[in-house]
Image: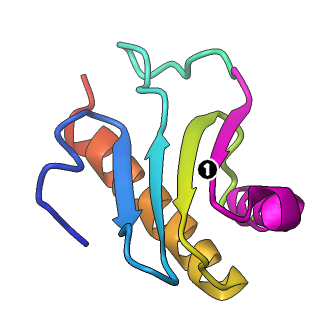
Amino acid sequence: MNSGHENAVPGRGVAGSFESCDALVVVTLPLPLPGGGASASGGVSLHLESPSLAVCGERMRRVALETLRALDVNDADVAISDRGALDCTLAARVETAVRRARASAEVNRP
């Protein structure tokens, strides 16, 4: 669900919802340094929350990390609140959140 407030923080993108069979994904990317330089890579920090974390946590982690890798994301803070999303839904939510974070960072580039 798009509330219109998800990109209030530069470099942040949000996709999905808390509805059943969906996931809310928040991706925060580091902003470029003034002068066009890149920030030092801090790696990917992935935070998962789900009622089925014990059963599906590794699968969700794998889907999220593979999607981030495919999008060349090497430095990000990713929070996923899962409510039973299918793998394809989770991958789509991660991709959308990354694209929105990139667009937000570009608009707010120093």
In percent of the image, x 21 and y 43: which residue is there? Answer: 107
57 or 32: which is nearer to us? 57
Q: Quadrant of residue 85?
A: bottom right
Q: Main secondary structure of the magenta part?
A: helix
Kind of residue sitting beneath label 1: Glu
Number of marks present in the image shown:
1
Up/down of 29 relative to 79, above or below? above
* Residue 62 in view, yes or no: no
Q: Secondary structure at mark 1?
A: strand
Is residue 80 covered in magenta?
Answer: no
Give residue 61's position: percent from left, percent from top: 79, 56
- Of all residues shown, which one is farthest toward the left? 4
* 41 sits to left or right of 94: right
Give residue 56's position: percent from left, percent from top: 82, 67
In percent of the image, x 56 and y 53: which residue is there? Answer: 80
In percent of the image, x 49 and y 78: which residue is there? Answer: 22
Q: Quadrant of the C terminus?
A: top left
Up/down of 16 relative to 11, above or below? below
Span colored in magenta: 42-69
* 5 sits to left or right of 61: left
* 57 sits to left or right of 2: right
The residue tagged 1 is 49
* Residue 72 in view, yes or no: yes
40 or 89: which is nearer to us? 89
Q: Quadrant of the N terminus?
A: bottom left
Give residue 33's position: percent from left, percent from top: 43, 15
Q: Quadrant of residue 2?
A: bottom left
